[in-house]
Image: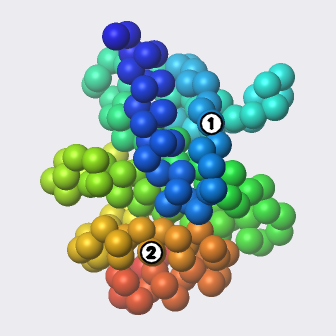
């Protein structure tokens, strides 16, 4: 199996395993994965021709010397589910704070997926790949011990703007540890 096939398989497994946690009634389908030169590990972009999103992965991840391909695929696949649930293209002051909430949600869901399908220790190995905006998701992940609690928190975060989500986050990780 080549890297493109492996990436597509990981993406499909993630979407199949997580779409219900994003409160979607049906599987939204899969996105194309494109390896391109990038400054970040990955991202999503809207493909005007196809009228849907593509997952873009930094081609440096193919070398194995930079970042982690699996975590990046899970994180970006999570963005694909999140944009189905809550558009990230809000207007006004909510845009920036909801971008941060989006990073918390996607990082948390990637960690939940790995714990659910592998184990907690494997999920912890991904901590070093979580971006700076997603560091709050690590604290959330570590402070909720049971899977049902993690899924319920994820659903709570999905229902809210960052302004409303902040009290939930603060309750779980403490006022002094939150930087959003």
Asked whether disc 1 touches disc 2, contact meaning CB atoms under 8 Å apart, the reply is no
Q: Which residue is label 2 attached to?
A: 152
Residue 91 coordinates in the image, percent (x, y): 83, 64
Q: Is residue 168 above or below residue 18?
A: below
Residue reaching furthest left?
121
- Front residue (pair 113, 89): 113
- Front residue (pair 100, 18): 18
Q: Secondary structure at mark 2?
A: helix
Picture quadrant of residue 29: top right
Q: Is residue 28 above or below residue 178?
A: above
- Res 128 visible: no
Q: CA distance from mark 1 to mark 2?
A: 24 Å
Picture quadrant of residue 73: top left
> In the image, 23: left or right of 67?
right
Q: Is residue 34 above or below residue 25?
A: above
Q: Which residue is label 1 attached to?
A: 29
Residue 151 coordinates in the image, percent (x, y): 42, 68
Residue 128 coordinates in the image, percent (x, y): 28, 49
């Amino acid at each position: 199996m080549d890297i493109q096939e492996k990436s597509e398989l990981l993406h499909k497994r993630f979407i199949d395993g997580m779409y219900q946690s994003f409160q979607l009634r049906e599987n939204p389908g899969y996105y194309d994965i494109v390896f391109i030169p990038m400054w970040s590990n990955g991202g999503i972009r809207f493909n005007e021709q196809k009228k849907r999103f593509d997952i873009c992965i930094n081609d440096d991840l193919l070398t194995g010397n930079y970042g982690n391909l699996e975590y990046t695929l899970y994180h970006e696949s999570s963005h694909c589910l999140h944009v189905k649930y809550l558009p990230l293209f809000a207007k006004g002051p909510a845009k920036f704070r909801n971008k941060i909430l989006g990073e918390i949600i996607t990082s948390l869901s990637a960690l939940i997926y790995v714990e659910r399908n592998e184990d907690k220790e494997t999920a912890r190995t991904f901590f070093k790949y979580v971006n700076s905006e997603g560091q709050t998701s690590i604290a959330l992940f570590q402070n909720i011990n049971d899977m049902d609690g993690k899924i319920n928190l994820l659903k709570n975060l999905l229902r809210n703007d960052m302004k409303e989500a902040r009290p939930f986050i603060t309750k779980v990780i403490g006022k002094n540890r939150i930087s959003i």
